[in-house]
Image (tube, grey):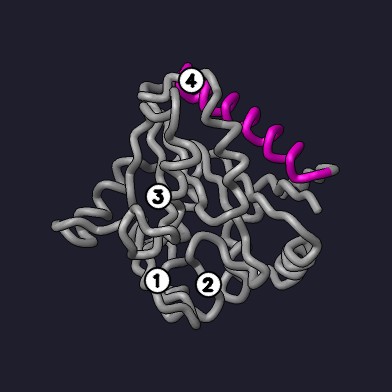
Amino acid sequence: MKLMSYPDSEMMMIDLANTLAGELNTVLFHAEQASIALPGGTTPGPLYDALCASSLDWNRVRVLPTDERLVPPDHPRSNEGMIRSRLLTGVAAEARMIGLRPGADGMAGLTERVRRALPLDILVLGMGADMHVASLFPGAPELEDALRPDAPPVMQITAPGQSEPRVSLTGPALRGATVVHILITGTAKRAALERAVEIDDPLLAPVCAVLGSATIHWAE
């Protein structure tokens, strides 16, 4: 684990956007396509605002949400919708979105679509104060299965105390990423990160599943 601290969140977002653009360009120099998985929510919006202006062969980039609520893409709580509106604009609109909502072919079809995008070249995660990443929540009844080495790359997950059903990339899909970035802000999440390092158990602190290979980006 590598920890990078920034004086403010604006500088962090700009710096990480530049880093991601450089990493994507490096992948595209060596391969026909690049895959990047990204979080939804409110925190990464400014990151996507900066990244979408980057000079890339966006038509060769595949974008996946790290997790999704099973709501329509135009729903305000849709991660796909948020990523489309903040990142897939302008030149970046040419990127291909691989959404995580099951279609007519159900979870089997979704699993195959996600599998074709693996291994991820780049993974960006947020982390909650409860130490969850993607939709891998402490206490979720499916968590142990989702962390198994032989888990499918994507599973339906129950978020304790929340109404919407969810789909999430699983432990093997997250751990298989070539590059992992975790984006956190505020003192509460910094304290949660420190707790996770002490706990060192993905069943209690799911972020531990990817901490070993991750670069943590933090600003107060």
Question: Where in the figure is residue 106, as x and y percent of width and height?
Answer: 19, 61
Q: Nearer the viewer, mark 4 or mark 1?
A: 4
**Label located before the other in sequence (4 or 3):** 4
| Residue identifier under label 3 | 81
Dominant secondary-structure state across the stretch colored magenta? helix
Q: Secondary structure at mark 2?
A: loop
Question: Which residue matches tag 1?
Answer: 157
Q: Which residue is mark 2?
A: 137
Sequence-first tag of 1 and 2: 2
Instruction: Say whether marks 1 and 2 touch (CB < 8 Å).
Output: yes
Q: Is residue 18 above or below residue 138?
A: above
Give the number of the disc on residue 56. 4
Q: Secondary structure at mark 1?
A: strand
| Towards the viewer: 196 or 14 | 14
Mark 4–mark 3 distance (CA, rounded to whole Å): 22 Å
Which residue is most to the right?
7
